[in-house]
Image (cartoon, grey):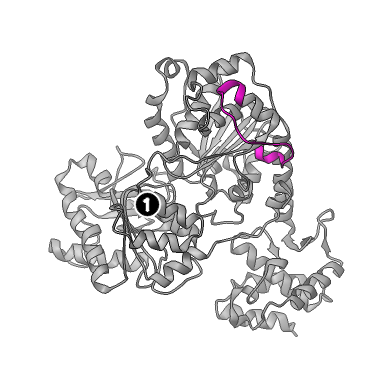
Amino acid sequence: MESKVIQALEQLAEQEIIFGAETEFVRFLLNLYPETPEAVQWAAAACLNAQQKGHVCLDISKLSGFVFGDPSSGMEISDQLKKEWLHQLEKCEWVSDGVEVSPLVLEDSRLYLHRFWKYEEELARWLTEKAHQTNTITADQERIIRKLAAPAADLFEVNWQQVALCLSFLKDMVVISGGPGTGKTYTVLNIIAAQAMAASDDKFRIALAAPTGKAARRLIESIEAGKAQLPEPVQEEIEIPETALTVHKLLGAGYRQNQFRYHTKNKLPYDLVVVDEASMLDITMWVRLVQALDEDTKLVVLGDKDQLASVESGSILGDICAGDNSFSVPVTQQIARITGMQIDSVDEHPVINDCVVFLTKSYRFGEESGIGKFANAVNRSDTEEALKLLKSDRYDDLNWQGLSNKNMKALIDTYAVQHFENYSGHAENEQLAQSNQRKILCALRRGPFGVEQINREAERKIRHRKGLLQSQEWYAGRIVMSTRNDSVLKVKNGELGICQGEETPRISFEGEKALKVAPARLMNYEPAYAITIHKSQGSEFNEIAIILPDKMNPVLSKEIIYTAVTRARKDTLILAEEEVLRKAIENSVERHSGLKKKLWNN
């Protein structure tokens, strides 16, 4: 007879409160360890459930509400329940401290699947070891830094881009976090140039990578656009890569089944590895990456710690970037000697702080930008300030409307229909760029305020205005998004395309402008007048409209609002009810892990 816990889990799976794998996991454990107490069975199920929701572990001390986050579980989390779980886990013979291989690992109040505990330990150890190593900037390196970045004119205003450049020589691992428009691309261009100029070998090997194909392409586009900002003699002196890879491809995914070509015993053949959009990188890929780095390889990581975390387990960039712009005395002394800037120093602090720099000055959003002010307020969870900004008539670039049928209709007309009708006035090679000046961003995929419904309504109106049958799928000007990587077509997951031509339609995608794909060859796609906020990560549009659901949803958080609003260059419109917006800004996503504590001792 099945245990009471398994029977309860099966019911929860039928109600779609849990994923279903939790039941099989507990069943597997009971086959191995039949005497497992019910408290441990529940904790094991909750641990797997947490990992599937993006946590590295289950931090029992931080649990509140109900088990699995749903009242339908029937198990309210109390202090007594947490004490019982921890007590039984500590007594359980097959739950270890990680030294011995076991299904579960208990560390303080954190419960891990063994594989994820091992990942976290390995990553924390690698980061700490790298952070402990500090180089001395040589005279030649100092000359290069001065060539690329003149000493600060205002010694009381720190130029954090120059600090990052100095850190790239002082440290073999540098993490640069900054919001949109803070100069991350310019900073990494200077770092690439400086490291290449300082190399003793003319064949200085550089790899550029990002978590997704779309992000890799945008990294190259940004670097190509930024090259002109480098001094002309520097442009002629160095060779910057013209391609970027996904992190998976960088590591040689597909070399053998479920194996990477590069790993602990076969290191990557590069002197410098740059990884962009690191907020999307989960703990598994972080570990695979650092395992494959040679001891002498420099790693430069770029991202925005305040954006949405990876879809898979962990919020690694956020855990690494848990400090501020302060450094140890030896580091600040070297930076001050070269740049003249005086930076806060502390006698004792976690060594990881010397490897992290925050770019705080936005060159996109000025002091009078409503978008910039609103994004900052959301980031601080300052709900009243955020709502005050939305209600103000002072900012032309920030607007707010309720979720009325009239507003929704007007939005679809403006963003999809009218814009679609205007695209034909542009040359064919400009049509995709023109059509992507505006975009609707939705928090949800399904439901009346989700991507699927908005796209259906937009296409219905477009077909009606063009006099097309509703059954006619392809028409000139149709906007679509690839939903999977296609190595044959060279189309990346998340890339936008436009259908061109009436009689023999072809789809032009962002990545390969010379490539036109016949609709019949495109197997994985969806309409893209509206896209999810998650899919918009790494993209930028002149104008965006953000649609939130009419009721609070677990997916809504300050991180998703911040990510959405910072996709806009010039104008943002938010369609949301005040109470939903308020709750979203007040809700901050916290991924359970022990990495922050291991790096920062807190």
Left or right relative to 505: residue 392: right
Residue 181: name its quadrant: top left
Q: Please determine whether, in this image, residue 211 is positioned above or below residue 153.
A: below
Residue 591: name its quadrant: bottom right
Q: Report the residue at 58% width, 21% height from top.
A: 338
Q: Please determine whether, in this image, residue 206 is positioned above or below residue 344.
A: above
To which residue does mark 1 refer? 371
Quick check: is 14 in the magenta stretch? no
SS at badge 1: helix
The quarter of the rendered structure image containing the N terminus is bottom right
Q: Nearer the viewer, residue 333 or 298?
A: 333
Quick check: is 337 in the magenta stretch? yes
User: x, y percentage for residue 374?
Assistant: 41, 55
Q: Please determine whether, in this image, residue 150 is positioned above or below residue 467.
A: above
Q: Report the residue at 46% width, 15% height from top.
A: 237
Q: Taking the image as drawn, is residue 502 in sight?
A: no
Magenta span: 336-354
Name which residue type carries label 1: Ile
User: x, y percentage for residue 148?
Assistant: 48, 21
User: x, y percentage for residue 285?
Assistant: 61, 47
Q: Report the residue at 39% width, 66% height from top.
A: 548
Q: Nearer the viewer, residue 186 or 106?
A: 186
Q: Residue furthest left?
A: 467
Dot 1 alpha-carbon crowd within 10 angstroms: few under 14, some 14 to 19, many 20 or more? many
Q: Please determine whether, in this image, residue 437 is positioned above or below residue 151.
A: below
Q: Report the residue at 40% width, 42% height from top.
A: 490
